[in-house]
Amino acid sequence: PTPVILDCDPGHDDAFAIWLAAGDPEIDLRAITTVGGNGKLAHTTYNARVVAGLAGITGVPIAPGADSPMVRLLSPAVGIHGDNALGGPELPPPAVEADPRTAVELIRDTLDAAGEPVTIVATGPLTNIAMFARTYPDRLPRIGDVVWMGGSTGRGNITPYAEFNCWTDPEAASIVLGSGVPFTMIGLNVTHQVLVTPEVMARIGAVGNRTAAFGVELLSYFNSTYETDQGMPEGPLHDPVAVALVARPGLVTTVRTRLDIELRGTETAGATSVDLLGKLGREPNAHVATGVDVEAFWDLIEAAVRTLS
Ligand code: BDR
Ligand code: CA
C-alpha cells in the first residue's frame, strides 16, 4: 500500500476522501491534517475528528493547520457545505482527539518516520502544503507526489474560471507548484463525472453500517445544496477521486502538461491555466487528470465504506 498523508477541509466530499483513504487496502493512511477552506479551521478539524471517529478510524493522528489562506481572506463554502462545513446529519461527539502538533509538524514527522516517499493527497486549499514547503524545503524530496483535488481544465465553480480550492488560496497553489515537488491535479473536468445519482445513494445506503447511514445523510444534503447553488441535482463527489488515483493508478487518466495558477487576473484569479495543446512552450510541470472510470470509482467507495464501522 502507498503511504499517504491526507490534507483536507471536511466538507461532505472530504469525509468520503477520509473514508476511502482509511478503508482501501492499497492506501496506508498515516496522518490527517486539516485546513480552513469549506469552513473555518475549528469546524474542519472538528468534522475530521467526527468523521474519522464514527467510522472507527482511531489510530490516525489528526492535526490542525492553517486557519486562513496565505494572502487572502477565507470565504467558506457555506452555500454548499453549510455553516459548520458538514451540514445535514446531527454530528455525534468526536471519538478521537486532535494531535497536539500542528499540521506542518505532523507532515514533517510523518515524512521523517516513513523511510520511503509519502504521497500527500490534498482535498482543500493548499495552504498547509505551501507552509510546509516554506518551512522545510529540505524535506520536499521525501514527498512522492502531491495529488490535489483542485482547479479545472475548463470552467470554474466559485467564479466563472476558478475552482473553489484554487480560488481560496491561489498563492499557496503557486508556491507548491513552484517548489518542484511532483504534482498531480484532479480538477472539475474530471470530478464532475462522478455524480451522486439515486443509484449511488441506494448502493451506499445498502452497506448498512454507521458510516453508510451517516454518509447517505451527507450526500442528500450535498445534492440539495448543489441543486440550489450550482444547478446540479446530482452533486459531484470531487475529493475521493484524488484518493482513488493513488489507490488504483489506472482508474484516473492523466496527461503530463504545463500548469500555471492565475494570481492577478481581474476576473480570473485562482484559475488554472492548463496548456493541453502545448502552446506556451514551457516545460511540463504537472500531471493533470483528464478522465475517470466512474463505475470503478463507486466500486472503490462502496468497498471502503464496507470495511468501516
Ligand atoms: C472542492 O471545493 C470544496 O467545496 C470541495 O470539498 C472540493 O474540495 C470542489 O471545488
Ligand atoms: Ca475539500
Image (cartoon, rainbow, N blue to C red):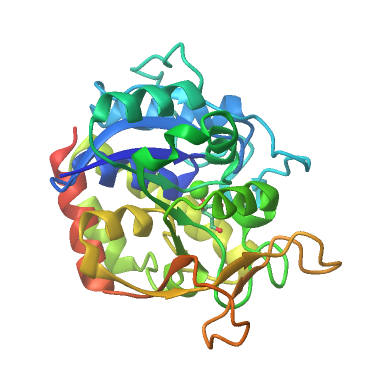
Q: Quadrant of residue 293?
A: bottom left
- Taking the spot 23% from the left edge, 27% from the top edge, the residue there is 56
Tell me if I can see residue 129 in this picture: yes
The residue shown at (35%, 47%) is 16
Please provide percent x and percent y for residue 244.
28, 57
- Position of 108 with respect to 232 (left or right) is left
Relative to 205, 241 lies left or right:
right
Foreground of the two, 265 or 94: 265
On the image, the x and y values in percent for residue 101 come to 47, 15
- The residue lying at 68 percent from left, 53 percent from top is 170
Residue 261 position (above or below residue 273): above
Give the residue displayed 27% in from the left and 38% down from the top. 211
Q: Nearer the viewer, residue 287 or 210?
A: 287
**Image quadrant assignment for residue 282:** bottom right
Answer whether residue 207 is visible to the viewer in this image. Answer: no
Asked whether, in this view, residue 276 is left or right of residue 147, the answer is right
Q: Where's residue 59, x and y in %?
A: 24, 21
Residue furthest to the right in view is 266
The location of residue 15, given as percent across then percent down, is 39, 42
Q: Quadrant of the C terminus?
A: top left
The foreground one among 210 and 34 is 34
Q: Quadrant of residue 255?
A: bottom left
Q: Indicate the quadrant containing the N terminus: top left, top right, bottom left or bottom right.
A: top left
